[in-house]
Every structure is written in structure tokens, then in C-alpha cells.
Image: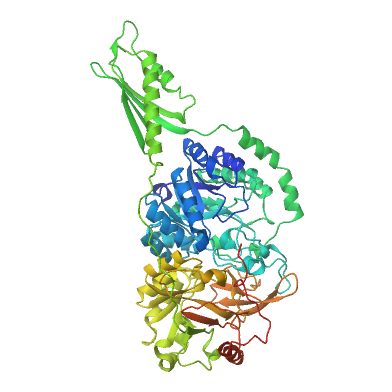
Amino acid sequence: MPENMRRKPEILAPVGGSEQLKAAVRCGCDAVYFGLPDFNARRNADNFAGEGLEETIRYCHDAGVKVYVTVNTLVMDDELEAMHATVDTAARCGADAIIVQDLAVALYAKRCWPDLPLHASTQMAVCNAEGVRELLAYGFRRVVLARELTLQEIRDIIDETGADCEVFVHGAHCMSVSGNCYMSAMFGGRSGNRGLCAQPCRLDWKIRGKDHALSLKDMCYIPHMQDLWDAGVSSLKIEGRMKRPEYVAAAVTACRQALDGGEPDLETLRSVFSRSGFTNGYLTGKRTQDMFGYRTKEDVTAAESVLDGLARMYKEAPDVKVPVRFYFEAHAGQPAKLTAASGDDRAVVLGPEPALALKTGLSDEQVGRSLYKTGDTSYRVWKIRCSIDPGLFLPASALNAMRRDVLDILEKDRNRFYVRTKADTPAKVLPAYEPPARPQLRLRFETAEQICGVPEDAVVILPVKEIAKHPELAQRFGGRLWAELPPIVYGTAARDALEQALLTLPGPVQDAVCSNIGSIHLARKAGLRVHGGFELNVLNSEAAEEYRNMELEDVTVSPELAFAKMRKMKGGMPRGAILYGYLPLMKCRACPGKTAKGCGSCTGLSKMTDRTGTEFSLICRDRQYAEILNSVPLYVADRAVPKLDFEELYFTTESAEQCAAVLALYREKAPADFPRTAGLYFRELL
């Protein structure tokens, strides 16, 4: 579709505090997003307190700017009431939408504030049309797509779903797929899924002689904004709620210039903040080593030369007002009529009947002089049209009164959309959790060659592609053989291939393990029973119950949740935990191990080191993405484990002999005879 037939996308600006808000609005954004003190993915930003939130949102609305409040972290059971209060505050104060990761947040908003739009956070790792469809069916109005997508992949998703999609166009790149990064949590208890990422990826990781191997340059898609508009993107999002107001001013200004057909000032934008330049590698599909970079002394020095000018630019700019169109009518024998329109809003007032003029009749210019006096209202006049019979008279006082009245009505009508009443819908009371007498054992293997010594009552989980290579395993294990879907599926070709593979699974295979909302959709479409994997990030009872309502059989609780809190989870959803495994720390579409020669010589398994020299495995996943595993395995079979429906051993790079040894230790509940970690099961997650 030609770009001029698509609705112009909004420019969505990041706001970490009041100065950033002023910079964003005055420099021409269409919408802003920010968090309240809790439950937002940038908890270290200044954010906005509830007391002044209504005034802040009114300031934005007076400028014609929408407000999206981020409630996009994972929530624990003992935080649910506080989360409810945060959503209540956002809804009552007039937020245009909330951005959500945890289904417990979405559930509460749907139940108590059904007219409050839900936007699915990029933390939900939506990378294909199936994920979008699943979220639309759930009740989300907009989906923030994963940052790793190409322009064609974005276009295909929108063409297939017709969804309102939001895309990041400028700012920092997370090395990992958002929502699938556990590095900060596992290293120091500061979870990126809870807004406290310590950014260990920005430290000096090494692979094959390359430094800073996990640090990507900031994205800059601003030169491609017309292409994104043409692709049907609804919202062009700038990253940077932790950045200074001058950065916000520069980014919004450049986006506005580009979207309006001008030449964006990328040099100033590069000076105010970059990491050795910018990259568009994900959007173009050119995922080379040029995507990687880190902040240098030269980058810091460059910022000093532009900050003063940017500060003056936004501080001296006038506050933005909403454009209004007037249509004035004066006809003999009829009351004068004034119509005001702004966007989709419209108001009409009637005035006195015009008298016959004793001298010169009322002119368009006289009407204009009165209507242009919008003063301290939220409006600025964009256009005036008049239809006036000759020889009529109406005093300026009447025109002024009509202007005041119609703008007052328009303002009230505009704000009526932000007045919400909380629905009196009682919450479902979840029963106490009743575990079985004995947990089921689930063994997740990477390859068929690892399988040995499987107990007769244990479930065997294998990747779909591995079952396709070894269909005889279905005869050996029958219905105890389950298919693991890849959590990340980019592009229609990979999606179509996976769909075909699911349809041709051996008959006994009737169950699938899914760790992504899109994979759930694909498995259900193939007629398989769905089991939720740990990367669904379930930390609370209500999220678990929501997945049960989505017809999942059970769910693996996130390894970010401490056992003490896992024991207190309620509800009837069967659940389990991983007790052993080299757990993934990151999923990276820009492979840190890729060389200038490409992937041809890669074996699929590499080693990288952190700044202490500790080695971590890097696994290639079908050239879709790379996965970084922890340096030591999780092992807690000898500890006090909660009573659950199932326990899982998660094998990846181990040999068959090592798998058998771990299984023997597990069955004896014996201590590990190898270096291990207890992960976060006995620590308090921040």
C-alpha cells in the first residue's frame, strides 16, 4: 500500500522525568510513555509519582499528546495488591493505555478497567504473526514487536494480522531478546524482567579475540521511517527513559523531521549519545560485526558540544497547543452558529441572531479577529471558514462568547474519554494449591544421542527437529515423548517450516512444550496439548491461572522465583520447576560468535569469556539466534524443593554419560559432584 494511504504513525517518546516530558512534548512527539515508581521496566528512572500524575497527563492531553503508562514488569504474589493500585492510578488519572508484560496485570486491567487499552510490551518477545494473533484474541489493542525483526518481517506480521503494531526506531539495543534475558538476575539478583537490569552485557566479554562481544551499537531506523510507515507500523518508538532531556529533544526532533519528509539531524543525535555510531542491522537483515560497539571517550566528548544548544531548543520552545478548525455561519433570521473541530472531536454552539448592519456588514476578517483569540486555552487556530450573508451585524462580544463556549465544550468532550469508572467485578478466589503425592520427572534433552536410562514413568522432551530426525523414538516412548517448540521463530519461512514439522510429528507425540506466546498458538493450531515452558516467565498464581484459561495443561515456574515464594503460589494450575541445567542467560539474534566470513565454519557450539576469564557456552539455534548458557549448571535436587506436579532436568551440552550421572544423582537426591549453582531459588530477587 502506498505510504500516503496509510495512517501516519505516531512518534512515541521516552520520558523518565519532568524535564524529559517537556522536551518530548515541545519537540513534537505524538505520545509519551513513562512509569510510576513501581512495576515499570526502568525503575531507576525518576518516573512519576501518583500525586502529580493527573496534572502530568492533563499537560500532555492539552498538547494533543497521548500517554502510555508502563506496568511492564513481572509481579510476585505478594505484590499483586500494590500492582492493582498502580493500575488504578494510571486508569483514574487518564492514561491512554498501559504497557504490560505479566498476564496478571492484563487480567486485572481487563476485569476492573475494561475500557483501558492494553499494549503488549516488547518483553513478551512477540516476533511473528502467531504471537500477535494470540494477544489480540486475549484482548490486547497493540503489540510492541521484538526489536530483532527485519523490515520485511514487520511488514508480513502487519499484513497477516492487520494489528496495531509498535516498533522501536531509535535507542539502545538489548543484546538479548527482551524478556528472555536472565543474565543480570542470575549474576546479581537484579532482574531485567523487573526493571533493574545491571547491564552485565556491557562489560568486556570476549570471543575469538573480539572485545565487548555482547555490546551492540544503538539502533537508528530514522532514515527508514517512511519505509516503516509504508509497512503499516502504527507507532514509532524511541528508547531511552534513562536518558537526559537533551537526548529526548534530539531524538524526537530527528524523528519529526524524517516523518514529515525533511532531512533529520542525525549528526546532532549521534553526538548526544551513541556507542561508536549507530546500526540498522536488524531492520535491514545485515547482522554483521558492524552492529557491535561500545561507548568511548570520544563519544562522551562529542556530547559536550551539543548539550547546551539542545537544552535551549526545548526550554525556549513554546508549549504545544492542539490545532482547531472553526466554521462560522451567520444567516438572516437564524441564530449564528460556530462549529469547532479538533481531530475526531467536534462541538457546536449557537449564538444570537445577527442584526441588520447600519453600515458595513460583518466580514470574514472581523470574525477571524475574535476567533484567533484562543488565549490560555489548549488550542491554537489552524483554519477558519465562514459563511456570512451580506449586510449582517454581530458584536465582537457575541463572537468572543461563542468562541469561549465552543472551546469549553470541545475541551470537556475531549477529556470525557479519560474519565473512567472502575468496574465492580469480583476477583476469582484461587484455591490453595494441592500438589500430587509424587512429582512427575521430565527430562529435556538437546539431542537423541543424550538419551539413556530414562525411567519408565518419565517424560522425554526433545526439540521438534530432533524428533523429525529420529521418529523411531515415538515407538520407544509413546505418549511420553513430547515436542519442544523453539521459543523464537523469525520470518514466515521458518514459521511455515515449523508448522509443517508439527503436522508430520509421529502419531504418539501429542504434547508440546512452548515458551513463547506465538509458539502456543502454533502448537494449539496443530492440535497438540500445550505445556508452558519456563521462558513464559510465570512468577505469580494469577499468571499461571491465566495460562490455564488459555488451555495450557501446566507451566514451568520461572527460575527467577525463589522456592519460598513458589510454595505460596495458589490455584489449580499444575506447575513444576527445573532442578538441573545449564540455563540460558540470553538469546541473541546478532550472534557474537559470527565472523567476517559468516557462519560457514561454525560448528554450532562456541565458548566465550567474561572479564574474569570464566567460560560460557554459545549455542547456535538453527541460525535463527544464538543462546548463551550459564557457566555452571543449576542443581538443587539435594535441597529442600517445594512439592510440585513435576520436576525437570534440562540437558543441553552434556554427553550421554553426563546426563546419566546427573539422573542418578537426582534419583538419590545426592549432592552434586561438580561445580553448581542454586540459581535464585534461595535468594530474594530484586
Above or below: residue 198 compared with residue 237:
below
Is residue 287 or residue 91 the one in the foreground? 91
Above or below: residue 686 compared with residue 436:
above
Can residue 343 be seen in the rendering of this structure?
Answer: no
Task: Point out the image quarter for the C terminus.
Answer: bottom right
Q: What colouring style does the render use?
A: rainbow
Residue, far top: 358
Can residue 572 be seen in the rendering of this structure?
Answer: yes
Above or below: residue 511 compared with residue 385:
below
Q: Residue drawn at (63%, 43%), measured in percent from left and top?
A: 245
Describe residue 427's horizontal placement relative to residue 466 as left or right: left
Instruction: Identify the image quadrant of residue 675.
Output: bottom right
What is the total number of numbered labels drawn onto the structure image?
0
Task: Point out the image quarter for the N terminus.
Answer: bottom left
Q: Residue drawn at (51%, 59%), measured in percent from left and top?
A: 122
Is residue 637 or residue 249 the one in the foreground? 637
Across and down, in percent, residue 72 comes to 51, 57
Across and down, in percent, residue 364 comes to 37, 19
Above or below: residue 444 compared with residue 198:
below
Is residue 597 or residue 479 the one in the foreground? 479
Q: Residue drawn at (39%, 28%), measured in percent from left and top?
A: 408
Instruction: Identify the image quadrant of residue 525.
Output: bottom left
Across and down, in percent, residue 119 comes to 45, 55
Across and down, in percent, residue 123 comes to 52, 61
